[in-house]
Image: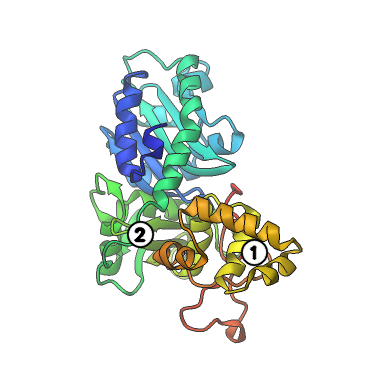
Amino acid sequence: MRLAHDGLDWVTFSAQAAEALHRVIPFERCCWHTVDPGTVLFTGTLTQNIACSGSWLAEHEYVIDDVNQWRFLARSGRGTGANSIATHGDLSRCVRNRSADWMGDELRGSFVADGTYWGAAAFIRERNEPWFTEEDVRFLTSLCEAMAEAFRRALVATAVTSEPPLANGPGVVVFDESGAAESISPAAERWIEEMIEIPPPSVPSDSKMVQAVAARARALRAGQDPLELAARSRARTRSGSWLLLYGTRLSGGADGRTAVIIQPAAPSEVAPLVALAYGLSDRERKVMRLCMQGQPTKQIARALGISPYTVQDHLKSIFEKTGVRSRGELVGQIFLEHYVPSWEELGDPPSGWFGHVKGPNDMPAAGAGVVVDAGVKGLP
């Protein structure tokens, strides 16, 4: 609990939390992941004594059905699970255990707070070590909300600290029908170097974040994701800037080929995530949007059908959650640090993501963001 409120970046928090947990629940290996709450795809990784590839991890989390997958633990409300318990003592029933000769029993936790999934971890024992117990599972469960709070706070703990590398254009990684990388652009290699992945991948195309997006794009059936929103993630870089990764199937040539595009994230992609990371409620996000449009309290009250006093209460709560004292400080110090411009509401697109403009006549002015007031709570 102390670590969760120390304002640490997520890598430092994870390393120190692992040391604390090890004193109560012994383990030999562990991994930690940040996720995009909108699509539950990995956005950062930290592993200790685990040598799995990015393609192996993505395949076993997003393609193959298996016990205790993190996204299912998050959606189920249980949050945690041990493979030995889920398989009733037969670890051969777990696909991960069958495919990894270094893996004994595994204890997993998905970090959810207020219905939002922020991160995940796994703790692994050697094959000759005792299995995790029900008591171990209950203990980790008791910590998951604090873990989620730490990951949420870390997302907005620091602003941009340096300029991103000179790769202004999108980077592209192309995969064949089996998921093997065929080619990668120099820009993609530079962006992958900026992502938080410890240790780094053996080759750039095996990045766990890139592989997760590619696996999701490969697994989607025709027509299942017409807006192409499911195979996307927003990742913060080492410098504090934001990247957008999105995957798509390719037509022509061999069937089943996919590509992952990596580029700087537009403000419209980042805004809902930043608002949620600050813990703003649905109503607070609406007040925030109107506030950033420059509307005074009375106009905000009329637009939302509430009293000016209620608007002031919401603003007070927003100030407390973001650590500022005025509207100007809120816009200037908090949201502009994350490239968030004025918000404009557009209909009702899928929960937890941004709205697409409808055509050339609907395009905003250069630099303007198009953001809806959707939360990022819905798990696919």
Q: What secondary structure is marked by label 2?
A: loop
Local packing at callout 2 (Cα closer than 10 Å; few below 14, some 14-19, many 20+) is some
Viewer-nearest residue: 233 or 324: 324
Q: CA distance from mark 1 to mark 2?
A: 28 Å
Quadrant the N terminus occupies = top left
Amino acid type at mark 1: Pro
Viewer-nearest residue: 55 or 157: 157
Q: What secondary structure is marked by label 1?
A: loop
Residue at 37 percent of width and 19 percent of height:
25
Give above or below for 293 relative to 11.
below
Residue 268 image offset from top left, x and y in percent = 51, 68
Q: Are marks 1 and 2 in contact (CB under 8 Å)?
A: no
Residue at 48 percent of width and 37 percent of height:
111
Residue 223 image offset from top left, x and y in percent = 62, 61
Give above or below for 152 relative to 252.
above
Q: Earlier in the sequence, mark 1 or mark 2?
A: 2
In which image quadrant can residue 361 be found?
A: bottom right
Residue 167 image offset from top left, x and y in percent = 28, 71
Local packing at callout 1 (Cα closer than 10 Å; few below 14, some 14-19, many 20+) is some
Viewer-nearest residue: 273 or 255: 273
Q: Residue 349's mark?
A: 1
Q: Residue 103's mark?
A: none
Amino acid type at mark 2: Ala
Viewer-nearest residue: 194 or 226: 194
Q: Is residue 49 left or right of residue 303?
A: left
Q: Is residue 159 left or right of residue 234?
A: left
Residue position marked by numbered label 2 in the rendering: 159
Does any portion of residue 178 appear in the rendered image?
A: no
Q: Residue furthest bottom?
A: 361
Residue at 71 percent of width and 66 percent of height:
301
Q: Nearer the viewer, mark 1 or mark 2?
A: 2
